[in-house]
Amino acid sequence: MEQLKQVVGMISYEIRHNSNDHPHRVAKYQENRNRNRYRDVSPFDNVPINITCLQHTRTYSMDMARNTARLHGEQCPADDHSRVKLQNTENDYINASLVVIEEAQRNYILTQGPLPNTCCHFWLMVWQQKTKAVVMLNRIVEKDSVKCAQYWPTKEEEVMMFKETGFRVRLVSEDIKSYYTVHLLQLENINSGESRMITHFHYTTWPDFGVPESPASFLNFLFKVRESGSLNPEHGPAVIHCSAGIGRSGTFSLVDTCLVLMEKKDPFSVDIKKVLLDMRKYRMGLIQTPDQLRFSYMAVIEGTKFIMGDSTIQKRWKELSKEDQAPSSEHSPPHPTKIITEKYNGNSVGLEKQEQMGEKINTDLSTKVQDAVDGNTESTVRKRLREDRKANTAQKLQQMKQKLSETERKRKRWLYWKPILIKVMFGTLILFGAVSCWKMYFQEHSL
């Protein structure tokens, strides 16, 4: 195990220093800043491709570049590093990235946990991308920090309205297991009246910056998602999210992709490091810690037992996961492991860039990786906690504003009705006095 840690540490270093760094300007626009949960996790922009055609170099969009290349018998450009764009809206921005692995015939949308002001955009994206399933790998609140808004109903037949984008979400059913819950949601387009069923897979015990309790429990969950058919190419891309949409989401997508590739070809020919580097072309910082990368290797190795024909392995995964035990509502995920941070998006978060290494890189690599882990952990954790506190504070302020708005509305209603009620009461008193006087007068004259 110690040897595996050293090997994975070296691979983590190579991945960090070979990952692409593409533009992400759109996320920094003033109007988009409040749509980002973290300032240092952004989707890559749509990168124009420069190609040479008829002795002229021009800048094309990805579709035009591909069409032009095919027309002139040239090699098609590589996939665009694109963010997901909302359609038919004034602002098309959402912090989400489409990850395309053509060889595995897998498409994923990796995104952050929705904010209170982006839940409506989240469901619009799910609808427009024809998504069949949402895979949620975080809890709403973790260690007293809000990691995600409550974007789906929690009670059966309860309805949540998202008027800004015109959607209604209803909880049809839920199946609660010890460490995950499956919700069946009805997503309705209010304008067209059309509705679709969305399966919501919620992993409830995966800690931030950490790993699941065991490869068996993770694979049991992964195969539950697979059995729904929602990851198959005939459907729209599954939406995978955690808090930032890079650590836990990257781990889930990497393991699933590698297992698919192993099913399609010689399992021993699959290069996990290369697969992760390819995925990082689409979204920055996938896999945040060496522990997450090591767990990915362990899960892939365990998953190959199923590929190699062990017909009893799924049953053993289910037994080891103890999914049928009663869940603990107070379950506290393990403390996050030490993390290395990586420089991207102008800040430091997850897998941090180490110092430049000299000629001794081959002999001192594992030692320096460990030194970087120890040296950067505290500042990275403090920074992430600070970002979490800011997000938590912002959400609380939003709730306070809503309460103040409701109080103000009540006050205005009272100011409107107050003079009317006073007049009614005054009129009632006059009427009551007049009736009393009339009765007294009538009684005196009747005597």
Image (tube, helix red, strand yellow):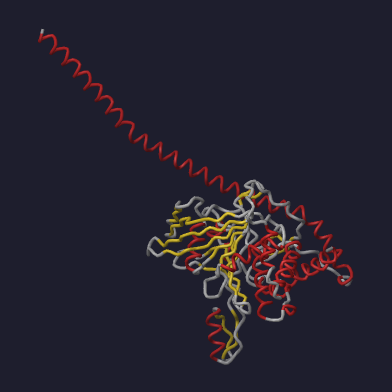
Quarter of the image holding residue 255?
A: bottom right
Residue most extreme to the left: 446
Residue 167 picture quarter: bottom left
Q: Quadrant of the N terminus?
A: bottom right
User: Which residue: 42% across, 56% down?
Assistant: 163
Closest to the observer, 58 or 340 = 340
| Nearest to the observer: residue 57 or residue 300 | 300
Left or right of residue 121: residue 319: right
Count of marks overlaid on the render: 0
User: Image check: 304 left or right of 4?
Assistant: left
Going 83% across and 66% down the picture, which residue do you hit? 6
Residues 410 and 157: in front is: 157
Residue 129 in the figure: left or right of residue 49: left
Q: Where residue 161 sits: x, y (%)?
A: 44, 54
Image quadrant in which the C terminus is located: top left
- Residue 38 location in percent, x, y? 62, 57
Q: From this viewpoint, which residue is outermost toward the front?
A: 312
In the image, what residue occupies the spot 49% across and 50% down?
155
Q: Position of residue 28 (x, y in %)?
A: 59, 62
Res. 88 image quadrant: bottom left
- The percent position of residue 411, horizontal first and vertical second, equals 41, 36
User: In the image, what residue occupies the spot 62% across and 47% down?
Assistant: 329
**Relative vertical location of residue 446 with respect to residue 191 in this rendering, above or below:** above
